[in-house]
Image: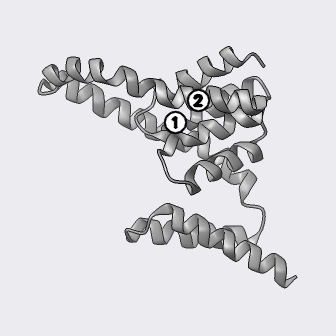
Amino acid sequence: MNVFLLYILLLKATMTSFSGLASLPMVRNDFVVERHLLADRQLNTAVVAGRTGPGPNGLYLVSVGYFVAGWPGAAAGLMAVMTPAFLILPLMYWVGARAGTPRVRGAIRAVILASAGLLLSASLPLARDAIAGPLPLAIVAVAFAVLSFTRIDSAWMILGAAALGVAVKLAR
């Protein structure tokens, strides 16, 4: 794949989301569904790789770029993650002057709700691919409960699930 096109696709996903994982539906549609450049399992791996390291939630786009085009793709993913930071200051100046108006607040709420719905629609196929037995299902249930009712960071849940998975594999 052309690295510039990869950058544009990842930038599109980054620019149309408020948080890192809100871009997941667009990334899945562009790379898994339409262009068949990634499998759901590779996208799951990219999300886990991006969430286990320190940094922004959208850092998984670097892994997506790497899976699609190697090191040049990873560089394109990194540039796609960094570009909005350079564009946000003028945008925040413009929105900040209008943030008190009901129309802007309503638009922001609508975008956040739509983003949540899109994230849910993209997460279900990824979950079907990732939950392949009783152990992964138990891990998902426990992680959901812990993350819903405590303040534990999701990175600790990912590390705990990985350690449990490795321990089960070694025990077999």
Question: Furthest residue to the bottom?
Answer: 171
x and y percentages locating residue 39 in the rendered image: 78, 39
Q: Nearer the viewer, residue 164 or 81?
A: 81
Three-letter amino acid code of the residue under disc 1? Leu
Q: Nearer the viewer, residue 20 or 76?
A: 76
Residue at (54% x, 26% y) in the render: 80
Residue at (53% x, 34% y) in the render: 23
The quadrant of the image that shows the N terminus is top right
Query: What element does badge 1 sit on?
Result: helix
x and y percentages locating residue 81 in the rendered image: 51, 31
Residue at (73% x, 72% y) in the render: 165
Q: Nearer the viewer, residue 114 or 83?
A: 83
x and y percentages locating residue 60 in the rendered image: 60, 42
Q: Which residue is mark 1?
A: 118
Residue at (59% x, 48% y) in the render: 50
Disc 2 packing (10 Å; few <14; some 14–19; many ≥20): many
- Which label sits in the foreground, 1 or 2? 2
Three-letter amino acid code of the residue under disc 2? Met
Residue 150 occupies quadrant: bottom left
Q: Which residue is mark 2?
A: 26
Disc 1 and disc 2: Cα gap in Å?
8 Å
Tell me whether circle 1 and circle 2 mark residues in contact (CB < 8 Å). Answer: yes
The tally of labels here is 2
